[in-house]
Image (spheres, rainbow, N blue to C red):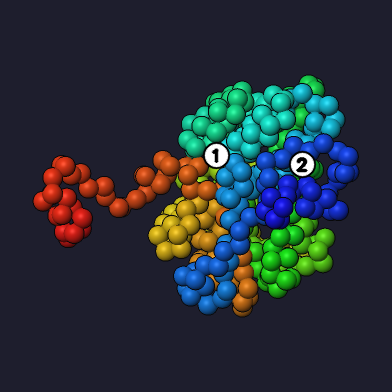
Amino acid sequence: MTKSHVPLIERYRDHLPFAPEDQIVSLQEGSTPLLLAPVLSGMVGATVRLKLEGANPTGSFKDRGMTCAVSAAVREGAKAVICASTGNTAASAAAYAARAGITCAVIVPEGKIAQGKMAQTLMHGARVISLAGNFDQALTLVRELTDTHPIVLVNSVNEFRIEGQKTAAFELHEDLHGELEALYIPVGNAGNITAYWRGFREMGASPRMLGFQAEGAAPLVLGHPVEHPETVASAIRIGNPVRWEDAMAATTESRGAIRAVSDAEILAAYRLLASKEGIFCEPASTASVAGLLKYGTDGASQVVCVLTGRGLKDPETAIANNDGKVIQCVAERGPIEEAVLGDP
Ligand code: AN7
């Protein structure tokens, strides 16, 4: 098997809390591409690479943690898992639960999760509860529920999630032979930045951890929870991150920072990546690139932006933020010629 065909837990078993005899639930996640970004590199004067986490089986980085969380749940004999989610955790939990043959419930903020994620979650057969409230309220409620019912919580408060997610740092460390100087990463609930830092530390590496929140949902930048978070990047519309302390420790220890980018900057990076680098990822992912373009590299020459989820997750935002017009045409030679070759 090539390494891309090895389940993440098998590839990194020495670093993960699973024994060889443990049955694992895998969709062959991890081992994602690391792609050079020539246009971005030219713009910032450094070698910029993109970690394409949307290449995971359900289209986001969540699968790394979910293979571990669901495998551990099954090992404990669990029959059900639950999460609160802005969409990607729900899609991933639903897929891994389906694969494991256990049930899954997800609580999502009403009207605030992208269509692709909703489609996935429903197709995998999860019970979807649309909450008249935001992500932070949903998470508080599932935590209460799992305190009193035998359902395993698979949000990133679950340590197995962080353990699985840290493998992305292992891959970067291997692929770049330890030369990475700075990591640009979107931050919502702050599980991912926590996990990368843990992974780098286990490899003896310490690149600067540069996290980016959307301006309207930037509690870690403001230093206090945001009661009504708002951003076009629905995946990171989170006002009170669970991994608050861990994220602050990661940035302090690595001499990094958590900073804010505006929705306009997120959308500009979203269009730039798709139209100039050929990479279509969802808006939350492009917070990392928006941060790179806004704040620069501060002297680092080898940097990586983590692109956490695919563009197809959120078709509505793509269609709504596009000036490329669709040209209507009758089925005749002359009008077609004009439509294809005429002035735009
Ligand atoms: C594409 O799915 O929180 O800082 O419930 O989907 O580890 O939370 C998603 C988060 C970045 C932020 N990019 O990661 C959820 C959820 C994408 C995401 C984040 C999310 P964390």
Q: Tag 1: residue type?
A: His
Q: Is residue 117 above or below residue 131?
A: below
The quadrant of the rendering that contains the C terminus is: bottom left
Which quadrant of the structure image shows residue 257?
A: bottom right
Which residue does the numbered mark 1 point to in the structure image? Answer: 228
Q: Position of residue 192 (x, y in %)?
A: 68, 51
Dot placed on the residue nearer the N-terminal end, 1 or 2: 2
Point out the frontmost of discs 1 and 2: 2
Q: Nearer the viewer, residue 294 or 271?
A: 271
Identity of the residue drawn at 62% across and 47% down: 56
How far apart in space, not on screen, are marks 1 and 2 (Cα)?
32 Å
Q: Please, what secondary structure does the residue beneath circle 1 have? A: loop
Residue at label 2? 68
Quadrant of the image occupied by residue 59? top right
Q: Amino acid at mark 2?
A: Cys
User: How far from the left and from the top, in percent, is residue 275?
Assistant: 40, 60
Is 90 left or right of 273, judged from the image as shown?
A: right
Residue 245 place in picture, x, y as percent = 75, 51
| Residue that appears at 69% across and 69% down | 176
Q: Which mark is residue 92?
A: none
Say which residue appears at 46% left-offset and 63% top-offset: 277
Q: Residue at x 76, y 62 (%)?
A: 200
Pointer 2: residues within 10 angstroms few (<14), some, or many (20+)? many
Q: Quadrant of residue 109?
A: top right
Report the residue that reaches farthest toward the front: 1
In this rendering, would 276 be left or right of 333?
A: right
109 is higher (above) or lower (below) than 341: above
| Near-viewer residue (70 or 251) | 70
